[in-house]
Image (cartoon, rainbow, N blue to C red):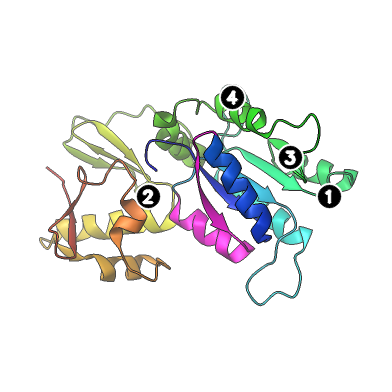
Amino acid sequence: MADRHIALIVEDEPEMAAELADLLRSFGHDHLHAETLADARACLDEGGFCYVLLDLQIKADGQSIKPRVESGMSLLLEIRKRFPHRSANDMHLVPVLVISGHGKEPKNIIGAFKDGINDFIMKPLSIDGQDVGAKIRRCLELAGRSDHGACDECNHAAAVGRTDKPHNGAVFWHAPDYSEIRLCGEPFYFTGDVNRAVIRLLHEAAVAGQPWQSGKATLAEAGSHDAEGKMSNLFGDHPCWGKLLLSNKRGKYRLKTE
């Protein structure tokens, strides 16, 4: 998955989610899937996606009786709060395309654009004249994501803005919130709350002279919801894997800081 774009699909209808996933695979993209607002928030914490396909009408959580537009709009506002920054082309650096069967309702369309969507896709996907792939490619291009290799930097810039601050030649440097690490000048970006927390905890352990830490314990302390408790599930496709984040192959991990 590391060499291709990854979409976060937020869709509570299994058949539609499967159709979207199949469509994305047809032009070489992978995906993460969230059914509810609560699931999507967990995905925001984990990070690792390049753009969002959002159904406005979703359930708040597993206990909800019915899906509501208010849940989708709440998620949209949260995405824009976490990733407010735009490219030089005035496209959000984390594009959001709303997918909804309610596009004939002007209030929903106007409200969604006002709150920060970048394009609108109607259900069913096969509507005449609707080129979903072209819409996605346009958003990625304007966001500076034509090449997936730029996505880590775009994710970081979407959250904190672009910076050219010097790193004073240090072998290991980190932003105060651990959203960016530099190792011998090579940048690594972390946009999810959980992955930033993991990197912080491992760095604190290294500073304290105990660099090797249990992966499962560190993930739990960082607030991960991964039932398997595997570092590879969170970082396996991240450029830091094997470079900045090292494994002893026995369940313990450390940061390379020198």
What type is the residue that disc 3 sits on?
Ile
Q: From the viewer's perspective, is residue 125 above or below residue 149?
A: below
Relative image position of residue 238 (x, y in whole percent): 33, 45
Relative image position of residue 227 (x, y in whole percent): 39, 71
Nearer mark to the viewer, of 2 and 3: 3
Contact check, label 1 and label 4, Cβ < 8 Å = no
Per the model, the C-alpha gap separating discs 3 and 1 is 10 Å
Q: From the viewer's perspective, is residue 127 above or below residue 216?
A: above
Tell me which numbered mark, 2 or 3, is placed earlier along the sequence: 3
Label 3 secondary element? strand
In terms of image quadrants, where is residue 46? bottom left
- Side (left or right) of 146 relative to 62: left
Q: Which residues are magenta?
A: 27-47
Residue 177 - label: 2
Tag 1 residue: 102
- Few, some or many residues within 10 Å of mark 2 (<14, 14–19, 20+): some
For the image, the number of numbered tags is 4
Tell me which numbered mark, 4 or 2, is placed earlier along the sequence: 4
Per the model, the C-alpha gap separating discs 1 and 4 is 26 Å
- Few, some or many residues within 10 Å of mark 4 (<14, 14–19, 20+): some
Relative image position of residue 179 (x, y in whole percent): 38, 45
Tag 3 residue: 121
Q: Is residue 78 visible?
A: no
